[in-house]
Image (cartoon, helix red, strand yellow):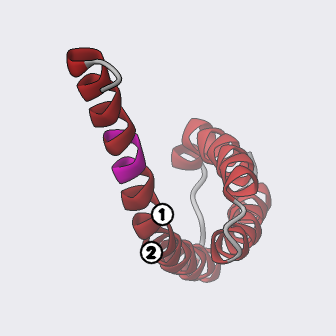
């Protein structure tokens, strides 16, 4: 990958991450999951070549700025998904408890 391709990949990841924030804000969990997979594909491509590409000063500054934005998106997504995940976990645990009680004591 060239330095321009590396930066383009980071920019693509940022655009997808911003879409992920929008999906999380609107509760579109399936879309969020699909976008996350696309970001992961970009991340794997970067892992394979990013260490071999040396960026000059301006490119490095741009990369760092993009990474900071990616981290901010990630933090926002976590803030939006954590309550949903807790609610989902509670529903699963409640359903499991109900099933175990029903199995243990029957449908009294």
Q: CA distance from mark 1 to mark 2?
A: 15 Å
Of callouts 1 and 2, the N-terminal one = 2
The segment highlighted magenta reads: 89-93
Question: What is the secondary structure assignment of the residue under circle 1?
Answer: helix
* Residue situated in front as seen by the camera: 83 or 35: 83
Q: Quadrant of residue 75?
A: bottom left
Q: Label 2's element?
A: helix
Between 16 and 87, the one nearer to me in the picture: 87
Instruction: Name above or below for residue 66 compared with residue 33.
Output: below
| Side (left or right) of 59 relative to 57 | right
Q: Residues within 10 Å of mark 2 (few under 14, many from 20)?
A: few
Q: Main secondary structure of the magenta part?
A: helix
Q: Residue furthest left?
A: 104
Dot 1: within a 10 Å radius of its alpha carbon, few (fewer than 14), some, or many (20 or more) residues? some
Q: Is residue 103 above or below residue 67?
A: above
Residue at image position (66%, 49%) is 33
Residue at mark 1: 84
Give the number of the disc on residue 9: none
Residue at (65, 74) in percent of width and height: 21
Q: Quadrant of the N terminus?
A: top right
Residue 91 place in picture, x, y as percent: 41, 49
Q: Is residue 6 left or right of residue 84?
A: right
> 25 or 40, which lies in front?
25
Q: Quadrant of residue 83?
A: bottom left
- Residue 75: give its label: 2
Q: Residue at the spot x=65%, y=51% of the render?
A: 36
């Amino acid at each position: 990958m060239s330095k321009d391709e590396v930066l383009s990949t980071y920019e693509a990841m940022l655009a997808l991450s911003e879409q992920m924030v929008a999906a999380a804000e609107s509760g579109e969990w399936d879309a969020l999951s699909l976008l996350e997979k696309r970001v992961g594909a970009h991340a794997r491509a970067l892992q394979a070549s990013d260490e071999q590409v040396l960026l000059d000063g301006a490119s490095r500054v741009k990369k760092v700025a993009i990474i900071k934005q990616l981290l901010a998106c990630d933090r926002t997504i976590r803030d939006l998904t954590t309550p949903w995940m807790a609610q989902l976990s509670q529903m699963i645990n409640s359903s499991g408890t109900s099933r175990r009680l029903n199995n243990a004591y029957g449908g009294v």
